Image (tube, rainbow, N blue to C red):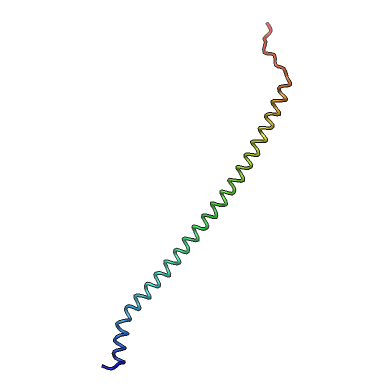
Amino acid sequence: MEKSELSSQNLQKLLPEIEKTTSFVQEIAITSKQQSQGVTQINDSIQELNRVAQQNAAASEELAANSEELTAQAESLADLIAFFEVNNEQTN
């Protein structure tokens, strides 16, 4: 058998393996793209959670400030009302 025929036969034997490897590489590329898209979605979700957490923190600070203001106003109102003397006795 000539070397060229032997080489041709060896290449013919390798061809299915090369095609299989090509198929695996394509599958890996597709899976990598899907994983990348999944990671992007997770990143977007984390950024949204972070945004909502920051909004909640700001709202909590505002509520705390409003609570302090209402407490101060209630104390002021109590001081103003204390000025008036209330008579609980009934006259007949």
Q: What x and y, as percent, mark residue 34?
A: 44, 64
Q: What x and y, as percent, mark residue 9?
A: 29, 86
Q: What x and y, as percent, mark residue 54?
A: 59, 49
Quarter residue 17 falls in: bottom left
Q: Residue at x 30, y 92 (%)?
A: 3
Q: Residue at x 64, y 36 (%)?
A: 67
Residue situated furthest bottom in the rendering: 2
Q: What x and y, as percent, mark residue 16?
A: 32, 79
Residue 45 vertical placement versus 22 (above, below): above
Quarter residue 85 falls in: top right
Quarter residue 60 falls in: top right
Residue situated furthest left in the rendering: 1
Q: Is 23 left, or right, of 41 in this rendering?
A: left
Q: Residue at x 64, y 42 (%)?
A: 62
Q: Is 83 left, or right, of 10 in this rendering?
A: right
Q: Residue at x 57, y 52 (%)?
A: 51
For the N terminus, the quadrant is bottom left
For the C terminus, the quadrant is top right
Q: Is 52 left, or right, of 8 in this rendering?
A: right
Residue situated furthest top in the rendering: 92
